[in-house]
C-alpha cells in the first residue's frame, strides 16, 4: 500500500475550567419541558439577533475543555438588548456536562435558565424542542442556529454524546427532521445555520438544509479543536444592529482562518454558502450524474468497466478530505470544484457545457470562502464520492446515502459505482513476471487503467523491510505496445538518522494527492509515536519536504509529525506537530494480511526538526542507502500494485 495518509488528529486545546464566579446561576426556567427547575422567562421585545447554539461537549470538553474555551470567548461579549446568545449544553463526562442545561450567555458569565436532567443530545427530538423553545422565549428579527461538536459529513452526521456513546451520532435525516418539525411549529427560517464541526461544508448537507436556512457556514475539511473565533462573531452582531447573515458569515470565515493561522494551523477551510442557490447546483450535478450513470449502465461489459475505471481515476486523483487507505478513514468527500474539472470525466461523455453549468452554479452558491496557506485552493463544498467505502468488508454506505434527500441520479451513480467495484467480472491489474536490466527491476502491467498505484518492496528472506515509490524507467520494446513499471533495486532506499546513533530503515510514500500547497510535504513516513503509560501508541506519519537545487543536490528534510485517529465519524484535527528532540517513534511495516503494523524492534529517537529559519546544516534529513549496504545478497526486491479499492493485488 503506497497511498499517502490524509490527516486527522485529536483536537488539542488545553483544558480550561470556568471559574465559579463566571457562572451566574439563575433559576429562570424552561417552557414546560420535563426536568426543568423553573418557569420560562417572559418573552422580551424582539432583539436584533438570537443565536441558538446546540453545544454537545463530547470528549472535546471532557479531555481538553474545548467547549469551555469557546464559551469564554462568547462571554467576552455576552447577550445584550439586540443580541441573545442562547445555549443548550451537555454530552460530556465531567461535572456540569452530564445533564442537559439551557443557558443564556452574558458578559463575564452564563445564566443557567433550565436544568433538563439526563437527556441524549444526539436525539433529534431534543434538538427540535430546543429550537422551538429558543425561538419562543427569545424573539428576534433574525435567528442563527449553530451546531458545536464533532462532524462527519453527510454519512457521519453530527455530534457524539459521551453519556450515550453507543447511540452514535445524529444522522443528517434525523437532524433535518428536527429542523422541519421546528419550522412547522415556529414558522422560522434561520438566516444562518453554522457548524463549528468537521466536514459539514458539503453539497448534500447544504442541499438538505436549504429549506430551513438562508446561509450555511461550514468547513469542507476537519477542524482543529480551537473552533471558531466566537468573540469576533458575537462582537460583530453586538456592534452592528441589524447585521446581516451575509456579513456575520464573512466574519465567521475570516475570524476562523485568522485564529487557526495564529495557532499554527494552516490546513483549514471555511465557506459561506447561499442556500437558495443549492437547488440549481444539485440539478446541474444531477445532470452530470445522469450522463455518468448511462455509461456505467452500458450493456457491453468492456465499455461499462472502462467507464468505471475513468470514474475511479477521476475520484482517486481529486483533492479529498479525511480519506485514507492506510488507516481506513472512509469519509470519501471530494472537493467539488476539483472533481468536476477532472479530465477523465470527458471520457464519460460529460460535456463542457455540463461542466460549465456546475462550475457557475457552485460559484453562485459559495459566496465567500477562505483556506489556510498550506492547502491548494478549494471550491467551498465537498461531494460524497466513494473510494475507500466500496470495499466489501466495510459497512455499506449505500443504504445511508439512499435515505438522504439528494437527487436520484447522484444516488444511482454512487450505487452503480459500488456495484461494479464489487462485481466479480471487473478486470484487475496484473503484473507479468518481473525482469531485470542491470539494477533495474521491471514488469509489464496488464489492465493498467485498473491500477491505482504501484510501488517497490525490499525484502530480507520472508520479511518485508520497507516500501518506496517507483523510481526508474523500464526498457521499452518498440515492437510491443505495453505498459511497464520499474524500480531501482539497489538505490533509493531511505533511513532516518536516530538521535541514539542508529540509522533506521523506513518506508517512504509519495504525497501524490493534490492536498498540500507546494513546499509543504512531498513524502510521508508511516510511524507510530511512543506514548508511555498509554494503552497504545499514536499512529501517524513523519512529513518530509523534498528539494533539489540547480546542481541536482537533493535534500529530504523531516519537518513534523502528523497523527492519525482510527476511522470514526468523529473527526477532529490539529495541524502537524513540530518535532522537539528525543521523541520516540517506531517505523510501520506493511503486511498484506494485517496492513500497517509497528515494528518495535527498530526505534527512532528524534532530532529537533526546527522551523523555517533553521539553517540547512541543522536539518533532520533522511539518508539514501543501497540495498547491498542493508542486507547484502540476502536482499530481495518485488514490485506491487494496488487497485482502486485500496486492495493490494500483487
Image (cartoon, grey):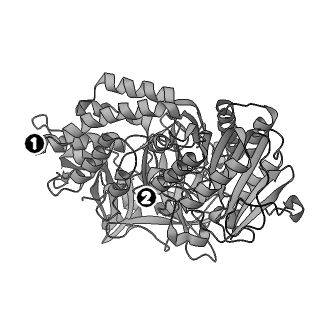
Q: Is residue 638 visible?
A: yes
What residue is drawn where x is 55% and y is 63%? 123
Distance (Cα) linking label 1 and label 2: 41 Å
Residue 165 placement, left or right of 445: right
Q: Are marks 1 and 2 in contact (CB under 8 Å)?
A: no
Where is residue 470 drawn, in percent x and y? Answer: 33, 48
Q: Quadrant of the N terminus?
A: bottom left
Where is residue 507 drawn, in percent x and y? Answer: 43, 58
Q: Which residue is mark 2?
A: 507
Tell me, for residue 300, which label it has, or none. 1
Q: Is residue 226 visible?
A: no
What residue is drawn where x is 77% and y is 45%? 84
Residue 343 placement, left or right of 132: left
Where is residue 375 drawn, in percent x and y? Answer: 54, 39
Nearer-the-camera pick, 71 or 305: 71
Instruction: Name the element at disc 2.
Output: loop
Amino acid at each position: 500500500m503506497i497511498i499517502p495518509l490524509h490527516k486527522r488528529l485529536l483536537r488539542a486545546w488545553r483544558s480550561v475550567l470556568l471559574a465559579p464566579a463566571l457562572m451566574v446561576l439563575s433559576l429562570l426556567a424552561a417552557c414546560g419541558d420535563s426536568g426543568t427547575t423553573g418557569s420560562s422567562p417572559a418573552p422580551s421585545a424582539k432583539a436584533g439577533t438570537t443565536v441558538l447554539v446546540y453545544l454537545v461537549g463530547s470528549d472535546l470538553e471532557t479531555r481538553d475543555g474545548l467547549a469551555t474555551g469557546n464559551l469564554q470567548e462568547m462571554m467576552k461579549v455576552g447577550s445584550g438588548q439586540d443580541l441573545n446568545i442562547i445555549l443548550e449544553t451537555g454530552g460530556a463526562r465531567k461535572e456540569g456536562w452530564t445533564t442537559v442545561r439551557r443557558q443564556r450567555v452574558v458578559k463575564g458569565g452564563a445564566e443557567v435558565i433550565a436544568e433538563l436532567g439526563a437527556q441524549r443530545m444526539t436525539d433529534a427530538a431534543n434538538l427540535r424542542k430546543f429550537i422551538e423553545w429558543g425561538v419562543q422565549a427569545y424573539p428576534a428579527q433574525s435567528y442563527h442556529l449553530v451546531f458545536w461538536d464533532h462532524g462527519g459529513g453527510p454519512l457521519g452526521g453530527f455530534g457524539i454524546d459521551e453519556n450515550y456513546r453507543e447511540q452514535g451520532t445524529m444522522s443528517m435525516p434525523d437532524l433535518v427532521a428536527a429542523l422541519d418539525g421546528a419550522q412547522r411549529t415556529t414558522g422560522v427560517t434561520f438566516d444562518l445555520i453554522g457548524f463549528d464541526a468537521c466536514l459539514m461544508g458539503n453539497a448534500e448537507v447544504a442541499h438538505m438544509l436549504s429549506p430551513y436556512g438562508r446561509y450555511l457556514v461550514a468547513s469542507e475539511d476537519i477542524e482543529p479543536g480551537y473552533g471558531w473565533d466566537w468573540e469576533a462573531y458575537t462582537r460583530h452582531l453586538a456592534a452592528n444592529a441589524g447585521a446581516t447573515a451575509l456579513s456575520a458569515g464573512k466574519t465567521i470565515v475570516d475570524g476562523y482562518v485568522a485564529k487557526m493561522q495564529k495557532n499554527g494551523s494552516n490546513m483549514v477551510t471555511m465557506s459561506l454558502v447561499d442556500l437558495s442557490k443549492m437547488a440549481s447546483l444539485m440539478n446541474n450535478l444531477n445532470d452530470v450524474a445522469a450522463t455518468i450513470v448511462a455509461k456505467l449502465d452500458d450493456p457491453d461489459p468492456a465499455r461499462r468497466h472502462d467507464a468505471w475505471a475513468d470514474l475511479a481515476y477521476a475520484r482517486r486523483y481529486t483533492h479529498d478530505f479525511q480519506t485514507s487507505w492506510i488507516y481506513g478513514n472512509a469519509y470519501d468527500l471530494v472537493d467539488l470544484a476539483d472533481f468536476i474539472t477532472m479530465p477523465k470525466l470527458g471520457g464519460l461523455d460529460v460535456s463542457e457545457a455540463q461542466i460549465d453549468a456546475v462550475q457557475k452554479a457552485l460559484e453562485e452558491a459559495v459566496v465567500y470562502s477562505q483556506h489556510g496557506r498550506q492547502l491548494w485552493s478549494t471550491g467551498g463544498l465537498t461531494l460524497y464520492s466513494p473510494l475507500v467505502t466500496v470495499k466489501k468488508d466495510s459497512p455499506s454506505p449505500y443504504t445511508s446515502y439512499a435515505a438522504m434527500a439528494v437527487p436520484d441520479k447522484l444516488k444511482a451513480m454512487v450505487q452503480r459505482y459500488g456495484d461494479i467495484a464489487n462485481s466479480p467480472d471487473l478486470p484487475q491489474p496484473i503484473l507479468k513476471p518481473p525482469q531485470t536490466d542491470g539494477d533495474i527491476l521491471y514488469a509489464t502491467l496488464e489492465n493498467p487503467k485498473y491500477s491505482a498505484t504501484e510501488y517497490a518492496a525490499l525484502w530480507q528472506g520472508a520479511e518485508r523491510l520497507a516500501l518506496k515509490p517507483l523510481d526508474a524507467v523500464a526498457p521499452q520494446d518498440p515492437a510491443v505496445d505495453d505498459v511497464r513499471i520499474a524500480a531501482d533495486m539497489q538505490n533509493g532506499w531511505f533511513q532516518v538518522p536516530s538521535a541514539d546513533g542508529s540509522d533506521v530503515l523506513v518506508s517512504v510514500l509519495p504525497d501524490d494527492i493534490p492536498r498540500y500547497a507546494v513546499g509543504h510535504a512531498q513524502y510521508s513516513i508511516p510511524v507510530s509515536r511512543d506514548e508511555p503509560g498509554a494503552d497504545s501508541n499514536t499512529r501517524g506519519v513523519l512529513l518530509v519536504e523534498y528539494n533539489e537545487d540547480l546542481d541536482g543536490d537533493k535534500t529530504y528534510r523531516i519537518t513534523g509529525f502528523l497523527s492519525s485517529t482510527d476511522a470514526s465519524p468523529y473527526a477532529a484535527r490539529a495541524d502537524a506537530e513540530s518535532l522537539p528532540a528525543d521523541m520516540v517513534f517506531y517505523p510501520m511495516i506493511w503486511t498484506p494480511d494485517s496492513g500497517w503494523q509497528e515494528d518495535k524492534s527498530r526505534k527512532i529517537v528524534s532530532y529537533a526538526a526546527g522551523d523555517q529559519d533553521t539553517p540547512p546544516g541543522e536539518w533532520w534529513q533522511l539518508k539514501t542507502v543501497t540495498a547491498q549496504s542493508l542486507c547484502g545478497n540476502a536482499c530481495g526486491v518485488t514490485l506491487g500494485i494496488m487497485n482502486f479499492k485500496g486492495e493490494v493485488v500483487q
